[in-house]
Amino acid sequence: MDRHNGFEQGPIRPPSEASSLLLRVNRNCPWNRCTFCSIYKKSKFSLRPVDEVIHDIDCIHDFIIRLQDRGTSPAALQKNLSPGEEPAFYAAYNWLEGGMESIFLQDADSLVIRPENLLKILRHIRSRFPGVKRITSYARSDSVARIGDEMLKEIAAAGLNRIHIGMETASDTVLKLVRKGVTKETHISAGLKVKAAGIELSEYFLIGLGGTEFSQLHALESADALSRINPDFIRFRTLHLPDKITLYPDGDTRYRWAPDLTLAKEVLTLIEHLHGITSRMTSDHSYNLFQEIDGTLPQEQERLAGVLRTFIAMDREQQILFQVGKRAGYFLRLGDMADPGRVNQVRDICRQSDITPDNADERIHEIVQDRMRRGMPF
Ligand code: SF4
């Protein structure tokens, strides 16, 4: 969504922020160079003046007051909107319906703006919506690392209580290859800073970013960094790369997409090498093959590792059925394969799509790439 009478919202939010009010404090990504990320590639980064953001907060506040007025129905309000008021109206309406508990600051890195401006925005949110329980944001590790400890505590006291960081990997080799623009040490110091400020921290691990060559290094280095940070959440995302993107540019030819079995081993290595932490681990994205990974460390670490071990130990035909059935929407978890009806339907798909043990990884990769080209889910 773009600008409408001043009110703006950006293109994305984490799935966990589905009920949050999206409040855009700046536009796009200040870095925008990660090779695997195309979200903001065609858009230029810009800061929004604080007054504009304050105006957006007031706009939402105004609609909420009117929507809560028992004398005015939402339909009547909607009918009398002035041109261009719809985006703010719908944002307010949806937020009210969602319980008005949380606000997500957009876009890719709200902590890159001047801390005093962020404080102004947070304090204004608090004054307008004192009942809000959670204010959250994406941030890059290097932006967080640049903020002083005391200032970060002030930001926390003003209401920012969860930060989502796309760690992706803590392997310096892979970080450099994909031009993430941060190092493992920056990831660790930023993560520790967030925690020390009393802000909840969500770290994202990008499955597959190391391809086949660096898969295990990617897992081991990330496990080491996450063990040192102890984030509140570790979330999984899976790399899906359009054909035209070169993941490792600058003439490096080492990237080979990794098949699902390699990725299962990668995630298992990560889980097995996490130690001394109390994070909640979650695979909360439908593109992930193992969405059932959801539990708290350390008590559920073995159970979570068990999901991967079970898959790795399956015979090849069963693995293929799960790989296909999960993507085709027949299975969500490995246990769903106990249903013979669903298994037979997936067998039919394999037959129709010419998927055999000899060509399964390539065929599944081709199908996923094709669906991505056509903008279809997979
Ligand atoms: S920092 Fe995040 S939003 Fe920006 S290019 Fe990298 S992955 Fe994309």
Image: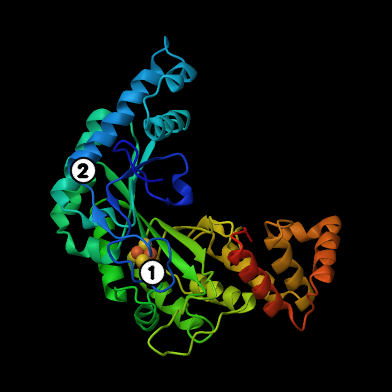
Q: CA distance from mark 2 to mark 1?
A: 26 Å
* Residue 122 visible (yes or no): no
Q: Residues within 10 Å of mark 2 (few under 14, many from 20)?
A: some
Residue at 68% x, 78% y is 361
* Residue 307 visible (yes or no): yes
* Residue 368 position in % (x across, y down): 64, 68
Q: Amino acid at mark 1?
A: Ser
Residue under pointer 1 = 227
Q: Secondary structure at mark 1?
A: helix
Task: Say left or right for 79 vs 308.
Answer: left
Residue at 21% x, 43% y is 157
Pick the quarter of the image with the N terminus.
top left
Residue under pointer 2 = 157
* Residue 38 position in % (x across, y down): 43, 66
Q: How many marks?
A: 2
Residue at 23% x, 47% y is 156
Give the mark toward the camera: 2 or 1. 2
Q: Secondary structure at mark 2?
A: helix
**Nearest to the observer: residue 159 or residue 12:** 12
* Residue 9 position in % (x across, y down): 36, 44
Assess mark 1: CB under 8 A from ligand 1? no
Q: Is residue 320 above or below residue 11?
A: below
Task: Say left or right for 234 vs 333.
Answer: left
N-term mark: 2 or 1:
2
Pick the quarter of the image with the C terminus.
bottom right
Residue at 59% x, 56% y is 286
